[in-house]
Image (cartoon, rainbow, N blue to C red):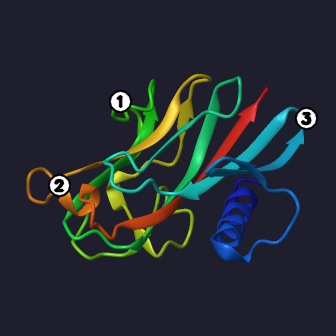
Amino acid sequence: MKKVIKYLVIIIAAFLLGYYSGPSLVNLGARTVIPLWNMNELNVEVSAADLTDATTTPFAVQNPFEATSTVDILIFDITTAATSTIDITCGTSTSQYLAPSDTLLDNVAVSTSTKGTLVNNCDAMSCPYSGGTNTKERIQVGPTEWVSCLISDNGGLGSTAGITDGGNAFDGNYVINWITNN
């Protein structure tokens, strides 16, 4: 069952990147939510959207359920590379404005001009780019918590200017798989 869910999310992510034509998408402003199923109180949803431009917080999404959820897949797809070396950290936070505490991607270094897809738990899936040992298989997200990403300057070795400058080219999107049993 776990493997089926992961492959289904990857297929849905591909659909969201331009190949999806089915009727079940729900657009919530800039974010798209796909309610996959609700069976015996097991609920699965996928959130996806473009990354926010010119900020060190490219996305922050509040738990869509009124109960503690599990996030088992987080895809951070860089479609247009930054002009500086950066670290990406994604995980749970009590506010959309605070750094993540429990992380799925923890200070994953991305070199200047690197495009690719960061995915947590790449041991279970075939991934084009892996965060390696700085990843976790899943995290618990409280009912009022957020999943967010923070971009930093690679421990002083890089710069966030390639992300925050007005002329930056950095672009991409994200996909989050949410599961709850309520």
Farthest residue to the left: give it.
156
- What residue would you read off at disc 1? 98
Circle 1: residue type:
Leu
- Label 1 to label 3, Cα distance in Å? 35 Å
Task: Nearest to the eye among marks 2 and 1: give it.
Answer: 1
Task: Nearest to the eye among marks 2 and 3: give it.
Answer: 2
- Residue 84 relative to residue 129: left or right: left
The residue lying at 19 percent from left, 66 percent from top is: 84
Residue 5 lies, in percent from the top left, at 73, 56
Circle 2: residue type:
Asn
Q: Identify the mark nearer the N-term, 2 or 1.
A: 1
**Residue 35 vs residue 43, the one in the foreground:** 35
- What residue would you read off at disc 2? 154
Label 3 Cα neighbours within 10 Å, binned few <14 / some 14-19 / many ≥20: few
Secondary structure under tag 3 reads loop
Label 2 Cα neighbours within 10 Å, binned few <14 / some 14-19 / many ≥20: some
Residue 75 lies, in percent from the top left, at 52, 59
- Residue 24 relative to residue 4: left or right: right
